[in-house]
Amino acid sequence: MRLHVIDVGQGSAALLEFPCAAVLIDTGGELSSSFDSVKALQRYLEGFFARRSDLNRTLAAVYITHPHIDHTRGLPSVMQDFTVANLVTNGRPRGIDGILFESGGEQQEKAEQQAAQRGALRKVIRAEVQSGRGVTDAHIDPVSCGEVDPVISVLWGGLDQNAEGWEPRVFQNANNHSLVIRVDVDGHALLLTGDLEAEAIESLLHTHGTLLNSDVYVLGHHGSHNGTTMPLMKAVTPCMGLVSMGPSDRQEDWTAWAYGHPRKKAVEMVTRALGCGRAPKEVQVGVGQRRFEPFLEERALYGTGWEGTVVVDLSERGTWRATTER
């Protein structure tokens, strides 16, 4: 298995590569005066499929964790330029009222309509997710490569009703309806929690417990202060962490600089939990919106805003190795 955490600026796009297939989780990203995540994602995917010509420009699945624009901006071009065999979403492109689109809901809903016409749409709702097991089927997990047969499961989905007993503001927050995706190859797993926030993370922990244990953890909500918790880290016990975010020097609205991502609190929390090391690197971490300070990272935490696209390989021996763009 090879994981490409693609540099789409302040957003998220992760490509999973297997011997016979590839899947994409989210589609970025940031749009600022100096950066266009749609073009960045297009370039990366074109280069990938030029190298992997055996895949015939086909993504076995595209998963959209939730309908915010920093996760859906590139979806129209992905649906147009490549073959998407399966589209997996949380089925909630609009808000709780069912009327107003979420910021990326229009892109998600249009893609859902296109996929549904081909019988290729799978909407995952929280109610069908089994405790300690998650949910999977041929749409969610369309990849089998002989000796390499990953198990792809969804551990969280969109909530039709507030069965978790959250406060109204928590239930109305689209982040808390994010798909949570676990990918396991021969007992070596990676976990992506979308933009799930603290209250939903607590519900996730109650639902799955030790099932969350994974070698590689992609930090929730781009390293936000409320996207990772210490109880989650104790359950995951990761070797390596990855952050999908923009650089701190693009000083415009809707950038990592504006949000203060990744937050020092989250970075320190994950760093303490990581079981693997890396070559020391001084990075910038947020101490508030538009405020950053240096941080010496010596554990295996990598970020697209610090070093561009990060590619992580799982070897046949079960070891992980990260390669950075810069």
Image: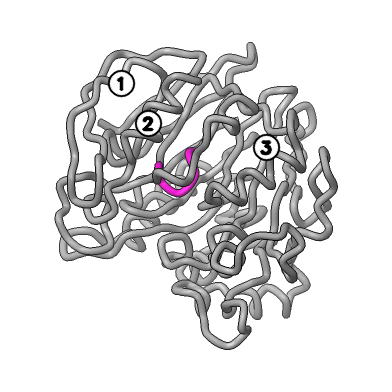
Q: Amino acid at mark 1?
A: Glu
Eye-nearest disc, 1 or 3: 1
In this picture, which residue range is highlighted in magenta?
219-223
Asked whether disc 1 touches disc 2, contact meaning CB atoms under 8 Å apart, the reply is yes
Q: Mark 2 vs mark 3: give the one in front.
A: 2
Q: Does the magenta stretch mainly form a helix, a strand or a loop?
A: helix
In-image side of 171 versus 321 (left or right): right
Q: CA distance from mark 1 to mark 3?
A: 26 Å
Q: Residues within 10 Å of mark 3 (few under 14, many from 20)?
A: many
Q: Mark 1 highlights which residue? A: 297
What residue type is disc 3 on? Answer: Val
Label 3 near label 2: C-beta < 8 Å? no
Q: Residue at x 68, y 33 (%)?
A: 212
Residue type (three-letter) at the residue carrying disc 2: Val
Q: Relative to 235, is 239 above or below?
A: above
In the image, 146 versus 132, the foreground residue is 132
Q: Which mark is residue 183?
A: 3
In the image, residue 229 lies in the stretch drawn in magenta: no
**Residue, disc 2:** 267
Q: Position of residue 191 (x, y in %)?
A: 61, 37
The quadrant holding residue 326 is top left
Spatial distance from mark 2 to mark 3, Cα to Cα?
23 Å
Q: Earlier in the sequence, mark 2 or mark 3?
A: 3
Alpha carbons under labels 1 and 2: distance apart: 9 Å
Residue 23 location (% of width, % of height): 60, 49
Tell me if 263 is positioned left or right of 127 in this view.
left
Quadrant (top left/top right/bottom left/bottom right) for the N terminus: top right
Nearer to me, 307 or 300:
300
